Amino acid sequence: MDLGTVEELVAPRDRAELPAFAAGDLLLAGGTWVFSDPQVGARRLIDLTALAWPSLVDVPGGLEIAATCTLAELAAAPVPTGRPALELARFCCDALRGSFKIWNAATVGGNLCLALVAAPMVAFVAALEGTCTVWTPGGGERELAAVDLVVGPGQTCLEDGEILRSITLPEAALASRTAVRQVSLTTYGRSAALLVGRIDAAAQQLVVTVTASTPHPVQLRLPADVSAEGLRAAIAERLGPGDYYDDVHGDPAWRQHLTGLLAEEIRQELAAS
């Protein structure tokens, strides 16, 4: 889609060339959303891909994923013996229901910051205890847990002028056992519920991350040997009937049922393994 109000394209080669935030600025990465909807009031595009961040970097204690890493690059990442949880990457990319053209352009950071309820990258980085590094205006940076980035449909906790730089997944989470479940109302539809379970061996906990069925990610930490009744009670305590999302992709009551059903399947799978 043509963006008829855009007057300028900025392609910074390093952080020093990033312009100060102004009304009408849009950050551009893959552009799969920016060029798919009318961007009323957009005046300037800031192309983050010009910064040439390495997509996937091994860092002390984990794996750093650049915000501009494409879904194709993430899905193709090798899954070494010590990082079995990286298998989630391919599953979550598939959950986007996008073609190879989308995979080659859409970015991890773009999917996170768009903050759609069904955004599968939100489930991926939140379930694996990701830490977001955010560039702040004036040259600083801050970190926040990936599970706290999205606060509602289309809403993140990022302030004007802040840029999501990367997400770091800790080695302990990458080494953990995981299980994932996803359901859509139609065969190739948007996720109505996308849940990821993980065994935190150090804390002896079952960590269940609920997305798509709720307006923002919800994470439950339970004893690793929690019973079906204990899991059901924990979900009911954390999520009431009014806490489930309502749109054309699923009724809240159905999503509530799905959440309980899929969480129990995850519990059983991880207990059996």
Image: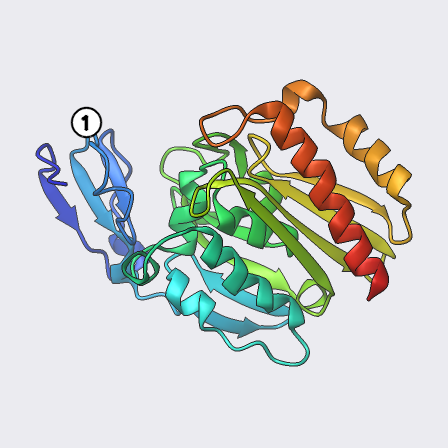
100 left or right of 217? left
Which amino acid type corresponds to the residue marked 1 in the rendered image?
Gly
Q: Is residue 248 visible?
A: yes
Residue at horizontal 45 percent and vertical 41 percent from the top: 190
User: Which residue position holds label 1?
Assistant: 41
Q: Which residue lies at the image location 26% right of the left edge and 39% below the top edge?
A: 26
Quadrant in which residue 193 is drawn? top right
Q: Is residue 119 found left or right of 83 in the rendered image?
A: left
Report x, y in % for residue 34: 25, 42
- 75 or 250: which is nearer to us? 250
Q: Position of residue 88 (x, y in %)?
A: 58, 62
Q: Is residue 23 above or below residue 142?
A: above
Q: How many marks?
A: 1
139 left or right of 232 in image: left
Q: Secondary structure at mark 1?
A: loop
Q: Nearer the viewer, residue 231 or 113?
A: 231
Whether residue 144 is visible to the viewer of this picture, yes or no, is no
Q: Give me the residue at 8% from left, 34% from top.
A: 4
